[in-house]
Image (cartoon, helix red, strand yellow):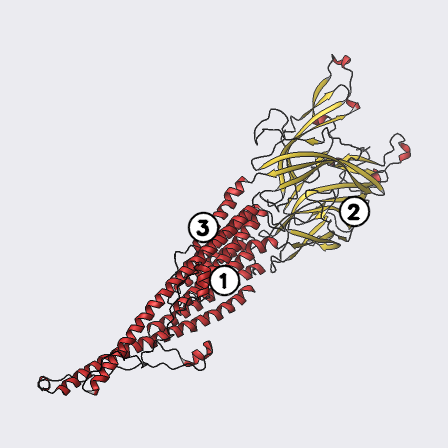
Amino acid sequence: MINGSFYDKDVPPMEGDELLLINITLNSFRLLDMDEVEETIQYQNEFLMMWFDPTLGWDRRLFPDYDSEYVMVPEDQLWIPDVIYYSTIDSEPILTPKDSLVMIRYDGWVRVSVPATITVPCTLRLQDFPYDEQHCNITLGSWIFTEEQITVVPNEQKIVPTPQSNIGQLPSIEYTGNSEWQLLSIDVSQIVEDISGDGNYSLILYEVRLKRKPVYYVMVIQTPTLIIGTVTIFGMFTPHSQRMERWQTVELGLNMLLAITMMLNLVSSYMPKTSRLPLLGNYIIAEIFICSIGIVVSMVLLEIHSRAAQRNWQPPDWLIKIVLFAWGSKKFAVSSDPPRDRPPSHQELSEKDDIYRLNVVKGQLTQTLHLVRGYMNREHVEREWLLLWTRIFDRIDLVLLVVFQAANIDQQQETIHFFNEIVLLWNDPRLAWDPAQFEDSDIVKVRHDYIWIPDLIYDNTIDSVNLVPEQIASADLEYDGTVRMSLAKTITSLCELKFEDFPYDKQKCELPLGSWYFSQISLRANKDVLEPDKGVLAGENSGGIAYYGNAEWSLLEIRVVPKFVPWDWKGTTLKYSQVVYQINLKRKPVYYVMVIQTPTLIIGLLTVLGIFTPFSQRRERTQRAELGLGMLLAISMLLNLLSEMMPKIEKLPLLGNYIVAEIFICAIATIISITLFEIHARADQRNWRPPDLLCQIVLLSCRQRKLRKISAQVDPQRIGAPIDHIRIMNGSHDAYKAQKQMTQTLHLVKQYIERDRVEDEWKLLWIRIFDRVDIVFLILFQAANIVAAVMFMR
């Protein structure tokens, strides 16, 4: 029907100044990928072009034997408008021009389908990442002809996305995003632009509006950063170490700065090098500043506390009133050294006066007793000062803890790549012959380009590679017109994956196979279910027809479902026959269990063991906080490793939930360890007496001996020691006073020593109590680790 004498494919179907209208329909749009670093968007789409060519129509009455309303013509035999995507970085057509067909109606209307995978630039606005929305403009129009010659007209003004279909099912016509991006809408407008001063060109502008699903980034980056920052501030400002061991908190803060900086580096790997950081990047920068200021404040407090303790500074009254709210604080005074009497000369000692000698002995004894009392008094006052400084810095630490915590709270492409071979059988009566006329030859082989081949393709294919070169591809012809041809290809196809149960997941991928142009072709499969070959391993040759997975995936079965896809054109409804292969796959989880889940479990178990093993109860527990935070970082890195294997889906997979659970277990264990250390440090520094009820509950000792009670303070100035049992010396009243003072001093020293002994007993009992508490928490958290592992293992 296309006669070269009457039709020239190089000449557009317009005469003189006549305007050609081309109707454009965006038939499908499937987002494949958004590359934030390169600022590009990749999608698969099909747009239809329809125009009127009066030279291609025919009068149906002149062809009574051909009652069809349209015919199919190879694309390379017709003039095709040069409508392309502007600013395209890459374009991969799904159908080559040689394989593409054009539909021509009897009234002269022409329709051509242009399916392709397109990559175009898209300027991103990432200030609100990962809660951002993006608008990407896609421009379509003629490359050569101006507006006066060709005008492109869109058939729609706005395209709404296709409702969510079942997992693995991809309808023939759809407008969808991917696992990371939700397609909001596609706004369509007709514009005219003057390009390079060559004239006005008619263009169609598609504004694709996308919204990111932020769950992936919240769970993988933001939540671990928040937990690390929170536990870091707890470790730095919880008043667990006030006796000049605060340097460990500085080391803790610096280590966590490194961890949070690594999180920032992880975010930057997703982003282009723009002049403004995204919202998530600003959040991590804020965490870095919070931790940095916390380290500086902790170092300042360390220096002040160290100087106050080493130089025996007396706490100022105004500081006590502001920080401790102690308005009636008692005064502390340190007694001065007593005046030293001149020792008697030999001439004075030569006198035989007993009273004189007794006065000399009394004077020396008074001096000695005054020195002892002065020493004890000074030690008592300095101890009170040190305890007061400790209380002051305890209160400052608690205030800063509240302040800094308030500031602180403020498979990637989803494709399946496979090799397959399909065998096509159809009957072409034009190719039949009588074997008797050709030496009983009933079958011959011919090159595939000598005969008509059905245009069967996979509907959701991204890439397809023929394994048999075209030069040697052939088909088998039988004498009755039966044609048999084998098509062996490596296919990359879309497959919407479901990762909630990863790595114990099952996937269902659908591969619709059908004719792209001919609704008259009816497809029929030979089998309804294709069972995998038993005992055939990945990569092994089964010696026949084999259906199997690979090293990671087991093929369960392939179901074959017939399907008809309706399509309306100019009031005529066409039904296209398809055969849908439903491929059911099951992942082999051993690799992920051994590489990710088992190391996470071991790290969690050892972390809890290191935090709660009662090996260190005398103020060295800060190292346990460092251990917990270090393990938090290690588990967060395992979560990042897992995230690199997965698409950025809306829900974390099963293994991801397990790692997040381990992060929370380690974080809670670290905070409990810091809290226990705070209680133990206060009991040790302030000489708290262990309550009898606590001893009976924790130590399980119902016959616990009663703890001795001692006075809260041992005051060297008090008088009143019993002396009734002391024999009063006959003689001078001064000798009696000296004996009484000596008795009181000895009693005071004895009481001082007794208090130290009882306080040592209390400290030892506190150690036993916290030993037992550590063992209880060790058992509880190890049980939580095991329960979590069992829950998330299948």
Task: Report x, y in % for residue 722.
Answer: 30, 79
Q: Residue furthest right?
A: 61
SS assignment at label 2 = strand
Report the front residue among 152 and 327.
Answer: 327
**Residue under label 3:** 606
Tell me, for residue 22, which label it has, or none. Answer: 2
- Name the spot of residue 20 as percent of width and height, x first: 80, 47
The image quadrant that residue 734 belongs to is bottom left
Residue 351 position (above or below residue 206): below
- Relative horizontal placement of residue 74, taking residue 250 as reference (left or right): right
Rounded to the nearest whole Å, what is the CA distance between mark 2 and mark 1? 57 Å
Q: Residues within 10 Å of mark 2 (few under 14, many from 20)?
A: many
Q: How far separated are the C-alphas under marks 3 and 1? A: 28 Å
In percent of width and height, residue 361 lies at 17, 82
Q: Is residue 278 visible?
A: no
Using the image as rendered, state which of residue 657 and residue 507 is in the foreground.
Answer: 657
Of residues 546 and 414, the one drawn nearer to the viewer in this rendering: 546
Distance from Cα at disc 2 to Cα at disc 3: 69 Å
Marks 3 and 1, the one that precedes in the sequence: 1
398 on left or right of 65: left
- Check disc 2 and give the amino acid type: Ile
The residue at which mark 1 appears reads as 288
Q: Quadrant of the N terminus?
A: top right
Considering the image in quadrants, where does the C terminus appear? top right
Residue type at mark 3: give it.
Leu
Q: Secondary structure at mark 3?
A: helix
